[in-house]
Image: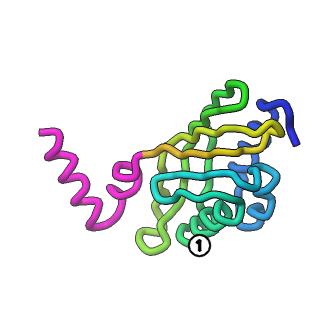
Amino acid sequence: MFTDHRAAIDHLCDWFESLSPGSLARLGEFYTPDARFKDPFNEVQGIPAITRVFEHMFDSLTAPHFIVTGRLVDSAQCFLVWEFRFRFQRFDTVTEQVVRGGSHLRLAPDGRVSDHRDYWDAAEELYEKLPVLGGLMRWLKKKAQE
C-alpha cells in the first residue's frame, strides 16, 4: 500500500473517476477492512457494506460517475471536492444530472481510507430534480426565503 498520503489520494481519485461495477472488487485496495462510510442516505462499516452502497448506486442510476475537481491533503486526512454525474433510470433518462459535494477522508498508516464522510445537500442537489417532489421542494425553499 501507500505510505505517501498524496500518492494514495491520487491513486484513490483515479479509481473513483473510473469506478464501475467491475472495479468494486478492488475496494479493499483503497479502504481498510473496518472502514466507515457515511453520506446523507447511508451509514455503514466494512468493505462488504460499502460495496453494497456502490452496487446500489449502479443498480439505481444510469451512467453514474465521479469527477474530482479539487483535493486538499493534510497528513493523514484529505477533503475531495467532486461532481457526481448520472441519469435517472425511472425518469428523464436523457438529461444528465449533477450533484456537487465533498468527501472528508481519514487515512490509515498504509494510505487506505479508514473513514469516509460525504457532504452534499440532498434537498438542493437531488430532491429538487425529481418530478413532483422537486416542485414541492422548490416551493418550500422559496417560502423559507420570504
Side of 127 where 4 appears, left or right = right
Q: Residue furthest top?
A: 74
| Magenta highlight: main SS | helix
For the point 46% across and 61% down, the residue is 95
* Snapshot quadrant of residue 57: bottom right
Q: Amino acid at mark 1?
A: Asp
Estimate the x, y position of residue 18 in percent, counting from the top left: 72, 53
Side of 12 where 58 appears, left or right = left
Side of 24 where 118 appears, left or right = left
Estimate the x, y position of residue 124 in percent, counting from the top left: 35, 49
Residue indicated by mark 1: 59
Q: Nearer the viewer, residue 23 or 110?
A: 110
Estimate the x, y position of residue 107 in percent, counting from the top left: 72, 38
Side of 104 where 99 appears, left or right = left
For the point 14% across and 46% down, the residue is 143
Residue 134 included in the magenta stretch of the image = yes
* Snapshot quadrant of residue 53: bottom right
**In this view, 63 is above or below 78:** below
Q: What element does badge 1 sit on?
A: helix
Q: Residue furthest left?
A: 146
Residue 23 included in the magenta stretch of the image = no
Estimate the x, y position of residue 105 in percent, counting from the top left: 64, 39
Which contiguous range is marked in magenta? Answer: 121-146
